[in-house]
Amino acid sequence: MIGMRIKSLLALSLGLLSYCGIAQNIDNKVLTTVDGRNISAGEFIRMYNKSRDPGKKTEIGDYLPQFIIFKLKVADALHEGTDTTLSFRNELKGYRNQVAQNYLTDSEAREALLRKYYQRSLTEINCWHLLITVPKDATPSDTLKAWNKAITARGRIMNGEKFAEVAKELSNDPSVKVNSGNLGYFTVFQMIAPFEDAAYALFPGEISEPVRTTYGYHIIRVADKRPARGKLKVAHIMKAVPSGATEQQINKAESDINDIYNKLLKGASFSELAKSFSDHKESAQHGGELNWFGTGEIASDFCEAAFAISDTGTFTKPVRTPYGWHIIKLLGRKKPGSFEETKAYLDSKLNQTNLTASMRMAFIEKLKAEYHFKLNQKSVTWFVANTDSLVEAGKKMYDRSKIPGGDIFSFADKHYKPAEFTDHMEKSPSRSLRDLPKVYINKELEAVISEQLLSYENSMLETKYPEFRYLMGEFHDGMLLFDISGKKVWNRASGDSIALERYYNEHRENFKSADGIQLKFDQVQGEVMTGYQEELENEWIRQLKEKYTVKTDTLVLREIQNMLQNE
C-alpha cells in the first residue's frame, strides 16, 4: 500500500516539473496564509498549471477555492500531528532519498554515457582473447612479469602464429580449453568495462596492446563486427549430453533428438514433445519456451542457430552445443529498440558497473570547484609520515598531542579538522596492509572528502533547486492529505454500516430504477457509499472553514492572473 502511494504521489509531483516560467520576484511572494502557514505564489502556480485541462480553461479565481480547501485539509492533518508519526517521517525520508539521487549525480554526464552505450549496443563484436592473470595483491614485480608474458604472447601472434594456438598454450582463462580463446559475439555490458572499451576501439583483424582489468592482462583480436540483430523468443527441445559423457550416452542423445525431429516433421505438437521429452525441465513445463534473449545472453552455438531461422513458427534441424542437442523453434523477433525504448535497460546495466563510481568522482570534482574546496597539504603530509602498518591495522593509535591544528580540508562554510580525520582513521582499519602509507592516507581522505561534500550538497538541495523544494513540499502535503482524508472520510464511510443504512433511508428517492422501482440497499451499496462520502466531505470542509483562518493577498493574486494571461 505504501509503495503504491509513493508511486502515485511521485507521479503526481513529477508532473509539476513541466512549469518553469515563473518570475523569481512573484515566485517567492506569499499568496495566501492558511492557519498561519504561508503559501507562496510559486507553489500555487505550479499546482494550478498541473490541474489545467488542455482542452478546458480553468480560471484562477475558480481554482483558488479548491487549492485553499486542499491546504485546509493539510492544516487539519498538521493540527492532529500526522507529520510527527514515525511512519510518516520514515516514508517522507525514503521519498527524499529517492528523489535526491537525481540531484547527487551529474545527470548530463550520465545521459551522454547512456547514449554512448546505446550506440555501442547497435554493434556486435566477435573476438579472440588470451588472459595472463594478475592476482589482486600482486607485487610490482609480479605485475611486471605478467605484463612481459602478455607482450611476448602478442609478439608471437603478430609474427604469424595462430591466435588459438598461442591462447591454448599461454592463456589462464579456463574457457580456453573449450573455445581456444574465441569468445563468440557479444555486445555492451557483457564484458568487464576496460575489455569492452578496448574491443570496441579495435578494427576487425586488429590486435590490442595488453589491456589491464581486475583479472590481469588481456590480448584481444577482433574477428568481426556486425549490426545488432535484436532479440528472439524461441522454444526448444533438448537432449542433454553431460560433460564427460560416454560415447554410448552421446549416441543415445543424438538418436533421441533425431526421433523427436522426425515426429515434428510428421506434424506432432512442438509444445507437447517439449513437455514430454526435453531434458531442460525449466522450459519443458512451458512447452520449451525461453525468455527473450539477444547476442551474448545464451550459448553462442544455440544463439547463432536461432537467429538463422528465417520464419516465425519454423524450427531447426538438431543443433549441437556444449550442453547437448537442441531443436529450436522461432516464436518471435524484435529489432533493436530506439534510445528511449532501451534507456531504462541500459540505465539498470550501468548501475551494475564500476562506471557509476567514475561518474560519482566526476561529480565530486564539480562540487569541489563550486564550493571552493581547499586541502591542507601539510596536514596530509603529517598523516603520511605518522602512519605505518600498525596504524593501518588498527593496532596503534596516532599521538594526539602532535596532531596538527587548523583544517585538513575546507569548503563552503565547512571546516574538517585533523582530529576528526584521526577519529575516522582509528575507527576504519585498513583491509589491505599492502598499501603504502601515502596510498592508504590518500584513499581514506578522498573517501571522507566525498562523503562530506555529498552530505553538504544533499543538505543544500532545497535551497539550490526550487523544483526539488516544491517536489518535497507537494509530496509532504500529499501524504498528509492522503492520511487525513482516510481518517475523516474514506475509512469512516467504509466502516460504518449503520451510517450507510441511515444515509440510504434518508435519500431513498435517489435510489430508484429508471421505471421508478425502489432499489434495495444491497443493490446500490456502491452508490450509497459514494453519496455518504460526499456528505462527510462537505461537512468536514464546513468545519475546516470555521476552524482555521485563511487570508489571501488580492494584489499578489491579481499579479499572478496578469502574468499567466500574458504567457
Image (cartoon, grey):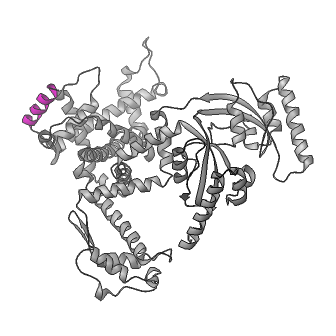
Picture coordinates of residue 515, whole percent (x, y): 44, 11
Picture coordinates of residue 14, whole percent (x, y): 33, 39
- Residue in the picture at 72% in, 40% down: 301
Query: Above or below — where is 236 with respect to 440?
Result: above
Q: Main secondary structure of the magenta part?
A: helix
- Foreground pick, 170 / 375: 170
Q: Is residue 549 magenta?
A: no
Where is residue 166, by image quadrant?
bottom right
Side (left or right) of 357 relative to 383: right
- Residue in the picture at 83% in, 46% down: 241
Which corner quadrant holds the C terminus?
Answer: top left
Which corner quadrant holds the N terminus?
Answer: top left
Query: Above or below — where is 160 with respect to 41?
Result: below
Query: Above or below — where is 36 with respect to 169?
Result: above
Q: Which residues are magenta?
A: 553-567
- Residue in the picture at 56% in, 51% down: 208
Q: Is residue 554 magenta?
A: yes
